[in-house]
Image: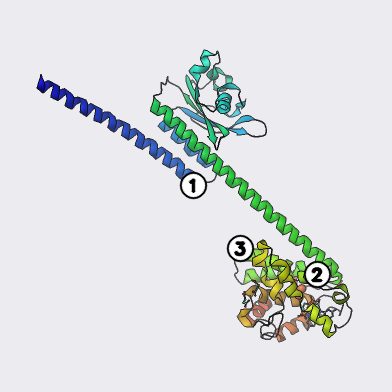
Amino acid sequence: MKLLEALAEMAGATLHRLRLYEDMKRSLANLQALQAIDRAITSSLDIRLTLDVLLEQAISRLSADAARVMLLNPYTYRLEFAAGQGFRSQSHQHSRFLLGEGLAGRAALEHKILDSNEALLEGEDVLRTSQFAEEGFVCYRVAPLAAKGQVLGVLELFFRAHHEPDQEWVNFFATLAGQAAIAIDNARLFEHLQNSNFELSMAYDSTIEGWSRALDLRDSETEGHTQRVTELTVKLAQAMGISDQDIVHIRRGALLHDIGKMGVPDSILLKPGKLTDEEWAIMRQHPTFAYELLRPIKFLNHALEIPYCHHEKWDGTGYPRGLEGEQIPLSARIFAVADVWDALTSDRPYRKAWSDKEALEYIRQQTGHHFDPQVVALFLRTFVNNAGDQSTTHHQR
Ligand code: C2E
Ligand code: SIN
Ligand code: SIN
Ligand code: FE
Ligand code: FE
């Protein structure tokens, strides 16, 4: 008797341990499934890819034959198809439910897991609709996808054989749905952020273009100057190997280079002749005005170099700070050549345009005095040897 009891106990313990082991194996696999989804969430903010991983895991870990995610359209209150796997035909993609309509609509509205048996009791047969005619489903379960108390959609599972879930299955279904909701929420947040950043940056850039056109209009004789100088500066910067990321700022800086002239009265700016010493003192402040004007705009901090430093000279005789050589930001050294080239070959209130030949001669002669020799060399190589190049044509009107 005692021996048998002992054996039975041992067998029971073994059985018990075996079941524990099986349970553990199952939870481990479930955990791995969650991790796979987690990875998909963090490595891809593309909602489609994440949903595909989710559906794959749902089908394999929850022994379903097909799975589908329907997302709530917040404007129409409809659940609309987002992703599906395991279906024989495409017609499942055309389902739409109003919130509260059908099992899926009710799961979403009431925030609870529902199944087809429950619906059958109420005389509703989800699986006999035309959409599923060819599918052979006999069993269906749907979980709401909710994050931060908000319903985002539903995760639906379809079975072609009868399926009786245990508690662990139900728990895991709920966990998976929770995970999916987080993924969707993240992806949407990110998309929204990206879109609003993009829109913001577009809005800024069109504001800048607007300002720069207004500035050219005021300085009526220099119309088109800013656009041409900006194009030439960007070309030179590209030829210098400056990164696209930095060129964005250089472009904005070039468009705004003379924004400080807003602080210079018309009587000086539009004066037909030479400036007096007092007038010149005011005119020479325009880079400082630009600095003060743009400094508080965080978005333009990296674009300040050109407006602030475009009248510095390589030999240290420029203004406003008398910077010398490489103390002058490279962007401003590049810009200076483009600016003077375009200014000289255009009519000004205070003189007629110079010919290309005269302007070129001047730029060559100012190498190492006004201009960085490397920039001049590049300017000559890239743009001037190239007769007929757009950037070297006359601009007088
Ligand atoms: P801006 O007309 O856009 O000229 C930009 C820069 O191109 C000038 O900076 C200068 O480096 C060069 N530049 C333009 N025209 C000439 C020129 O006839 N000869 C030479 N050697 N270089 C020229 P700068 O000199 O610092 O002048 C800054 C701004 O001051 C000019 O911008 C213009 O708005 C104004 N300005 C300069 N001189 C006069 C002037 O004699 N009369 C008037 N009304 N404005 C002037
Ligand atoms: C700036 O980047 O703050 C303006 C350029 C300069 O400091 O020289
Ligand atoms: C710069 O800060 O970009 C140039 C150096 C200086 O401003 O002194
Ligand atoms: Fe200027
Ligand atoms: Fe200019």
Q: Position of residue 365 (x, y in %)?
A: 72, 86
Which tag, 3 or 2, sits closer to the chain's start?
3
Asked if residue 209 is positioned above or below residue 371 in the image, the reply reads above
Between 142 and 93, the residue placed more toward the observer is 142
The local secondary structure at tag 3 comes to helix
Which corner quadrant of the image does residue 33 belong to? top left
Mark 3 is surrounded, within 10 Å at the Cα level, by few (under 14), some (14 to 19) or many (20 or more) other residues, namely: few
Disc nearest the viewer among 3 and 2: 2
Disc nearest the viewer among 2 and 1: 2
Which corner quadrant of the image does residue 261 belong to? bottom right
Q: Position of residue 195 (x, y in %)?
A: 64, 49
What residue is disc 3 on?
245
Residue 221 in sight from this viewpoint: yes
How far is the residue under mark 2 from the one under mark 1? 48 Å
Residue at 82% over, 67% down:
216
Between 32 and 263, the residue placed more toward the observer is 263
Q: Position of residue 303 (x, y in %)?
A: 67, 67
The local secondary structure at tag 2 comes to helix
Tag 3: amino acid: Gln
Residue at 42% over, 30% down:
171
What residue is disc 1 on?
42
Tag 2: amino acid: Met
Residue at 21% over, 25% down:
12
Taking 211 as reference, is 187 left or right? Answer: left
Disc nearest the viewer among 1 and 3: 1
Q: Which mark is residue 262?
A: 2
